[in-house]
Amino acid sequence: MKHLHIKNHITSYKKIYHLLIISLIFQIFFIINLYSKEQVGLITDQKGLIYKTNIDGEQIKLNLYDSIFTDDEIFSESNGTATILFNDNTSMLLQKSSSFIVNEFLLSDTKVNLFNLTINKGGAIIESGNIAKMDNGSMKIETENLTLGVRGTRFNIKSELNGSSTVSLAIDSFGKVGSLNVSSEGNLKTLFDPTQVLSAEQGNEIIERPATDSETKELEDATEEFIQSSKIDENIIQKNLEDQLIQGNLQDANNDGKVDVSDINILKQTIKSNKQEKITFITENSNEDNVTFLSNVLNASDDGSIGESINEIFESKNDLIAILVSDLSDFDSTFITTSKNEANNEIKNKIYNQFLSDDTNEDFNLEIISKIISKSDKETITKIVDNVQTQSLSNTENNKSLKVLSAVATFNNNESVNLDDEKQTEVNRLIKDAIENIKENNEDTSLLANIITKSDLSVIEEVVDFIQDAEEANQQSGLSLKVLSSVATIQSEESLSLDSDEQTEVNRLIEQAVERAGDNNEDSSLLANIITKSDLSVIEEVVDLIQTAEEGDDESNISLQVLSSIVEIQSEESISLDTEEQTQVNRLIKEALIRNRDEEEDELLKGILDNTETEIEEVIEEIINEEQEAAEEAAAEEEEAAEEEEEATEEEEETTEEEEEATEEEEEAAAEEEEAAAEEEDAAEEEEEAEEEYDANGFSFTTPFLHKDTGTEYNNEGFNSDGYNDQGFNENGDYDSVYDTNVSES
C-alpha cells in the first residue's frame, strides 16, 4: 500500500508538470504573437468608419486615438478618412475607400531604421518623418505595381482597382521638396518635380505627365489636415475620450481590468506626449525662412500647450521665437493677447525681455511688441509697459519707451486701430519716460514726431504738454523746433495730414520754437524745413513769428538765414511752393531787403535772389508800390484829418451862434413872460374893479340893472334883479304883471 501511494503521488506530479509545461509553452507563444505586433502609430483625426483586420481576419472598428500596429490592415469605408501619426512623426492622410498595412517598422539607435508600408487599394497622402530623412533610414511604399523609395517629402500615392497606380509630389510643410525613386516591372524613375506625375499600369512602363490642377490642389489641401492632426488641444482630447468612455469604446489603458476616468488621464497624457514629439519634430525641421506650418499648428493648439511648446522652442531653437510670436499675434492668439494663464505670463515675460534687450533685430522686435500691444487686453498691455519701463530704467541710453511708443503709433495708424481709453492710458505711461530721456538728435526727434503725426488727439495733446514742460525745465532746449521740423518731414514724405484740432495742438509748439531759434545754420535749416513742407496756415504763422522776433531785435537777420536754407532745400529736394505759399515766403524776402545788412549778408541775399524762383524786380516793385501806397494813405489820412478839423471848427462856430440865438430867445421869452404877467395883473385888477360894480347876484347897482354875464336885465336863468322873468313869474311861480313884458307892451 505504501508503494502504491507513493506511485500515485509520482503520477500526479508528472501530470501537473506536463500541464505546467503546456501552459508555459502557450504563454510563450502568446507573448511572441503579441509582441510581434508592434504599436507604430496613432489615429489623430477621423471622419466616418475606419476599421482594421488583424492576423486572424477579425474586423475591429477603430476610434479616434486608437493605436496602429504592424501587420494590421487598416480600412476606410466610402465615407471614411483618417489622419495617422506614426512613431517617427510621419503623417498619413488615408483617403476614402482605401486600405494599407505596415509591414515593417524599426526606429532605434541602431544602424538601420526601416518603414515599409503597402497600399492595397485607394490612396494616401503621406508626409515623411524621421526615418525617410535619416542617412541610415529606409522608407518604402508599395502598391500592386509600384514601389517607392522615399527621401523626405510629401507625396500622394493611389492604387486604382484596374491595377494602375499614380504618384505625385509636393512641397512639404517645411517648404522643401524631396524625391521619390519609383520602380515598376524593372523600370526606375526618380520624381523630384512637384509639377509632374508618374503613373504605371500593370505590365506597362512608368509614364511621366504634368500634374493636373486638382492633383496639385489635393496635395496642398492636405496641409490643413496635417495641422489639425498635429495640434494639441487638451479640451478636445478630453471630450473625445469622455465620449468614448460613455459609448464603451475606451481602452483599458492602465490594464487594471476596468475602464474608467483613470484611463482617460493616462490616454490623454500619452496622446499629448505623441503630439508634443510631433511639434518638436516640426520645430527641428523649421527655419526662419519657413516657420508657417509650425505657427499654424501652435495657433490651432490650446493656450497651455502653446506655452509649453513656446517655452521648449525658446530654449532649443530661439531664433524662431520672434517669427512665431509675430505669427501668433497676426492670428490674434489668446496666448498672446490675454494674461489669464500665470505659467504663460512667465514665459511671455521672458520673450518680452528678450525682444526689448535684443538690439540686433530691434526694428522687427519693436514691430512685434507694438502689434501685441495693439491687439491685447488691458492686463497684457500693463505687463508689457512694465517691462518696457524696467528696460528704460536699466538702459537710459536706449530710449525703449520712445521707440515702443513710435512703433505702436505706426502700427495703429497702418491698421486703423483705436485703443479704448483704459488701454491708451496704459500706453501713455511711457510718454513721460520717453520725453525725459530723449536726446535732441535726428533719431529721437523723428520718433517723437512719428508719434505726433500718427496718434489721436489725446496722445498729441499729452506729448505736446510734456515737450513744453521739458523746455521750461531746460531753457537751452530746442526740442520744439526739432520736433516740428521732423513732423513736417514725415507729413511731406508720407502724405499725412492732421485734422484741425490735432494741428492746433501741434501749433502750440510753433511760438516757443521760433522764440528759441537763433541766427545759426541749424535752427534756420529747421525753420526752412517747416516752411517748405507744411501747409499754408503753418507757413503763415511761422513767418509772422519770425517777423515779430526781428522787430524786437535790430541785429537779427534770421529772415535772411531762413531764406538761404529754403533755397537750399528746394534745390536739393526738388520742392516747389504754390502761389499762396510763395507769397508768404516773399514776406521774408521783403524783410531781408529792408533790414540793415553787412557785406556778408548782402552776398548771401544776392545768392538767394539769384536762385529763387521769385523775380527780384517784382519783389522790389512790390515794396516800392507798398511804400507809395503807404505814403498816399498817410497823405489822405492827413487831408481827411484837416477836413475833419475844419468841419469841427465850423460846427463849433455854428454851435456858438445857436447858443447866442438860444440866449436871445431865452431873453425874449423872459420879456414875454414879464409882459404876460403884467397883463394878468391888469386883468386881475380889472376883474377886481368889475366885481365891485355888481351885487352878489351879478346885477349892476345902477339902472337899468344889467347882469354882468349876459349884459341884459336877465341872468343866465332868465330872471331879473328882482327875481322875475319876462313873463312875470318868479322861481316860486308867483305872478306879477309888472314884470310881464307882454302886459306892459300892450
Image (spheres, rainbow, N blue to C red):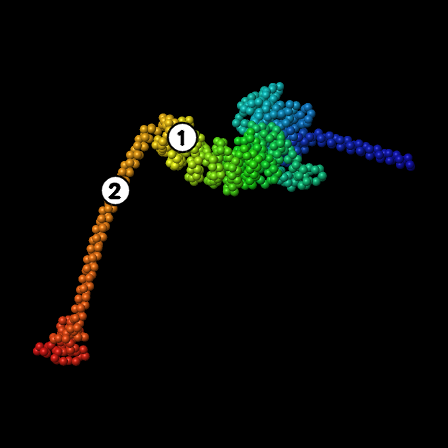
Label 1 element class: helix
Left or right of 101 in this view: 213: left
Where residue 509 appears, as percent x and y from the top left, is: 44, 37
Q: Is residue 309 left or right of residue 512?
A: right
In this rendering, does residue 296 appear at all?
Answer: no
Q: Quadrant of the C terminus?
A: bottom left
Kindly identify which residue carries mark 1.
561
**Residue at position x 91%, y 36% from top?**
2
Depth order, front residue of 153/379:
379
The residue depicted at 39 percent of the width and 33 percent of the height is 555
Q: Nearer the viewer, residue 701 or 21?
A: 701
User: From what the image shows, is residue 206 above or below residue 87?
Assistant: above
Kind of residue at disc 2: Ala
* Residue wearing tag 2: 642
Measured Cα–Cα span from mark 1 to mark 2: 45 Å
Tell me where residue 551 appears, x and y as whole percent.
37, 36
Category of crowding for the residue at label 1, using alpha-carbon neighbours closer than 10 angstroms: few (below 14), some (14–19), many (at least 20): many
Residue drawn at x 24%, y 46% is 649
- Type of the residue with mark 1: Gln
Mark yes or no: residue 684 visible: yes
Q: Residue at x 87, y 35 (%)?
A: 8
The answer to whether the residue labelled 1 contacts the one labelled 2, judged by CB atoms less than 8 Å apart, is no
Q: Is residue 711 left or right of residue 306?
A: left
